[in-house]
Image (tube, rainbow, N blue to C red):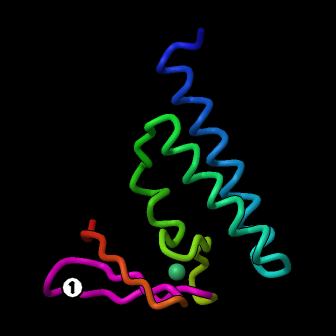
Amino acid sequence: MMSKGLIRQVVKERIGILLDLARKELKNHEDRSKRYIKLIKKLVTRYNFRLPKAIKRRFCKKCNTIWVHGYNLKVRLRSKSKFIEYICNCGYKRRFPLG
Ligand SMILES: [Zn+2]
């Protein structure tokens, strides 16, 4: 049986590969791209994996689209309240703390 640490490592690697694929397919095969993001969500649920912050900021939880700055994502900086707001093309908004 694989140890927990090894499973984590494998899941993380898979997620990295899926993100790359989703990014590559976004413009020509959006459906396929979304399927990769759905697979990531499945992996996360199945292995009870906590997504690192950097990965959480890479796709929309609502419409399963990988975010590409200037293409399907708007970023607003709210320096007064110290957070950054990501606005997806589907209208979904997500806030992340600055820094
Ligand atoms: Zn979205």
The quadrant the C terminus occupies is bottom left
Categorize mark 1 by other alpha carbons within 10 Å: few (<14), some (14-19), many (20+). few
Q: Is residue 16 left or right of residue 82?
A: right
Q: Residue 32: horizontal and vertical position, in percent?
A: 79, 68
Ligand 1 neighbours mark 1 (CB distance < 8 Å): no
* Three-letter amino acid code of the residue under disc 1: Ser
Q: Which residue occupies 74% across, 68% down?
A: 33
Q: Is residue 73 left or right of residue 39?
A: left
Magenta stretch secondary structure, dominant: strand
* Residue 73 is one of the magenta-drawn residues: yes
Q: Which residue is mark 1?
A: 79
Q: Is residue 1 left or right of residue 23?
A: left
Q: Which residue occupies 56% across, 25% down?
A: 7
* Residue 39 is one of the magenta-drawn residues: no
Say above or below: 29 vs 23.
Answer: below
Between 7 and 48, the residue placed more toward the observer is: 48
Say above or below: 39 vs 73.
Answer: above
Between 28 and 45, the residue placed more toward the observer is: 45
Q: Residue 77: horizontal and vertical position, in percent?
A: 31, 87
Name the quadrant containing residue 79. Answer: bottom left
Say above or below: 1 vs 56.
Answer: above
Q: Which residue occupies 70% across, 59% down?
A: 36
Q: What is the total number of numbered labels drawn onto the structure image?
A: 1
Q: Residue 76: horizontal and vertical position, in percent?
A: 36, 89
Q: Residue 80: horizontal and vertical position, in percent?
A: 14, 87
Q: Which residue occupies 57% across, 82% down?
A: 69
Say above or below: 75 vs 48.
Answer: below
Tell me the element at label 1.
Answer: loop
Magenta-colored span:
72-88
